[in-house]
Image (cartoon, coloured by chain):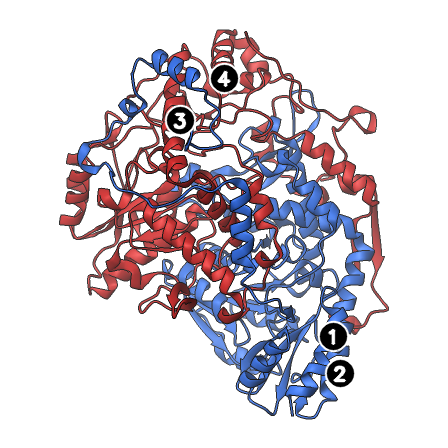
Chain colours: A blue, B red
Amino acid sequence: MTGGSPYVPHTAEETTAMLDAVGVEDVEDLFDVPEAVRFDGDLGIESRTEAETKTEVAGLLSRNDDLTEFLGRGHYDHYVPSVVDRISGRSEFLTSYTQYQPEVAQGFLQALFEYQSMLVELTGLPIANASMYDAATALGEAALLAARVRETSGSTVLVPGYVREERVSVLENYGAGADLDVQRVTTEQGTVDLSALEAAADDDTLVVYAENPTTRGTIEPDLDAIGDIAHDNDALFVVGSDPVALSLLERPADVGADVVVGDASVLGMPTSYGMGLGLFATREDFLRQVPGRLVGASEDAAGKRAYTLTLQTREQHIRRERATSNICTNQAWVALRTAMHVAYLGPDGLLEKAERMVTLADEVAGALNGITGVRAPVDDRYHFREFVAHTDQPAHAIVEDLDAKGFAVHEIGEHEVQVCVTETNAGSVDDLVTAFQEVAR
Amino acid sequence: MTHHYDQARWSEAGGEVYESLLSEKGEKTVEIDDSALPDDLTRDSLSLPDVSEPELSRHYVRLSQQNYGVESGPYPLGSCTMKYNPPVTEDVAAVDGALVHPDRSPESTQGTLALMYRLQDYLARIGGVDAVTLQPPAGAAGEFTGIRIAAAYHEANGDDGRTEVVVPDSAHGTNPASAAMAGYDVVEIPSEDGRVDLDALAAAVGDETAAFMLTNPNTLGLFERDIEAIADIVHDAGALLYYDGANLNALLGRVRPGDMGFDIMHYNVHKTFATPHGGGGPGAGPVGVVDDLAEFLPDPHVRESNGGFELYTPEQSIGKVHGFAGNWLVLVKAYAYIARLGEEGLLDTSAKAVLNANYLASQIDLEVPYEPFHHEFVASAGERDAADLAKRMLDYGVHPPTTKWPEIVEEALMTEPTESESKRTLDQLADAFDAAAGDDDATLEAAPNRTTARRIDQTSAARNPRLSWQALDD
């Protein structure tokens, strides 16, 4: 048969036999659709061979300029080891779905159980779920959790000025239904201004959010105090971070975090135009308010340890409009990859990577600071992966000129650019510095 | 002839566990005292698994062997559309140009934007809608986006008394959950013979209704034949009609939601367009809308401009529903799948999906109370426990259907074979249904026996939650 789906296995004889068995002459007879709503037009979509499909997509994507990216601000390019790509791509993982029959899904369930366990160690909090979509939606879910556990305690979510507009926009969308009001709090040197936060927090505060490291790459010097302000106002303290940073920086649980959110895709995916993996960890007493899937250990009929999705009565397929979240399809496969990557690195490798994110940022800022017309870092803080540089020239011109020389950096203010360095672009730092020298004066 | 199935099992530590946890294979604690950062900014120590790369590789290969995917065998979970995932889509998603940073300028990412624009266009054609956003990262996120768009639309019209979203009792749980998340009261209406009861709908919708959410065909596989009347009732009340795309596979190229009067829809590209679900995700849930609603789509949106493509913010955009551009690599795979199939392939997909469901139902002894159905059917285990029957089917080498839902059918087995199963496989599935149904209750209750794990105690998992290896010693 020509022109059909290449993924349909039926021979003409089989189709005929099946139609006979069903008792119709033509497959169209099986469509119980009124004539009035039938589509009799042409979709105008030509089919391609497999080779043509590959060529077309590769050709389209080759229209992207080949730039060396020094971009971060919530999405980071860390080298993904081959073993992670190879093993996570096994079809038993890749082509499975949610583990509704745990007896034939022990592999994925165990991997997600291990992922949850790694987040427990990294955050210090005892409960982690099996994934959210990304950092922004995880933050939105954290605010909704707060609204459920603090029903009588206000509706304001305080967000530092450094948080990306995109995250705030998602948070506002998630909070709209619960009438949450998102307010920005002033920052100082790229971190939370404690006196401004103290002045902003009151009885109406539901959540105080902070990031560590921040969107500007700064390390918060006094997370403890931010947590205290949250708790003094009966608000939840939500901390945003990522698995690499969490391996080195103080544990959110130790500074009073009630929920940790963030993007774990830093170890699971290349940058991929922003594909994420929302991490979500929280306190034991919020267990029954957690959004998303949870994998738990249990026993099978032979008395052996086995894993299963658990506490599903929180979820939409059972609780419907009273569910803790609408999430169903999540980012399980990315979580699998993150778990593999963490295991690949081990504690030494992960820490070494994290330490390097501090020293690299320091070195590159220092190198840029030596250039006439550039001052870096702008914030007098320790940095992780990235930092802000002041440029005497308009930032817009700097970014355009660097683009022409093959480099991408963020333009974040009239005279401010942001530069992010990881192990994947560290080899191009000298070239970037040279390019800066040529464009910054 | 029934098949039997032996899933891989691994035995370590004297057979007490099947495959040790990574933490049991080797764990290491590193003290953090000599750091690039002062002590008060760092944690004290870090404890994580510590295994060599070969050990790691074996661990995950073993885990994969204990997991069932579409390439392991038939996977007829109702409403999940677990069809074959062609590997070519993996290859196209791995090209360098796909892996750019989301903050790259539109000028330097014309390839990415061109692909997004083309996919928006293809999805709009398939859905019969005017504009599509690719941002929502899953179907439920698409529902939430759609309901937020409905809210913004009513608000823009000064129509702010609409506080309810109506759903049929057969709706997927995500529908009421998404509506509630967007702040709406959910009104559930009963079905009549498995379809929307028009009188109940007319009684339920009114000045307070923001939207009615519907799957068509519905979760019983039944086409809502009165869709035109349904659309009239909803629109006459000033409400919007929302299409849940979970079952779109049944209609490709034959019926389009936009033509049926739907104002907003989401696509489950991981179902309909064969992108792998990866153990529960990632998916993608693009949302399509009619012209009147295009101004409310999420920010940013892709449009053509001077022969190129640009990102722009629709005038009354609801803002963002994902921090960046959604699950981009899933979208690349969906584009490749649609391009590979073309219109003829899409038409064939629905034809064979519907034929397969009808054929399979005709070959099993269990009762199928509601018909004529399209791409999925709901069989009834009757006096037997559907969950037990499903567990027994695992021993016969197939993944069972969705069980005990929808509740309209007693002991439901909601079955969607999809187009990618052959007659031979469908016969194997039918054998598994019938063999399990023919086994005695004791056998069913003891099943499964040939899988990695025997029947798992769900109750104790929930009663005594142990959600990490740290919690195992408690």
For label 1, the SS is helix
Name the one closer to the observer, B322 or A392.
A392
Residue at 70 percent across and 78 percent down: it is A432
For label 2, the SS is helix
Residue under pointer 4: B429
**Real-space Cα distance between discs 1 and 2?**
9 Å
| Left or right: B135 in relation to B474 | left
Does residue A206 lie above or below B267 as drawn?
below
| Left or right: A361 in relation to B272 | right
Residue under pointer 3: B352
**Real-space Cα distance between discs 1 and 4?**
58 Å
In terms of image quadrants, where is residue A255?
bottom right
Q: Is mark 4 in CB contact (under 8 Å) with mark 3?
A: no
Instruction: Give amino acid for label 1.
Output: Val
Does residue A121 lie above or below A304 as drawn?
below
**Real-space Cα distance between discs 3 and 2?**
63 Å
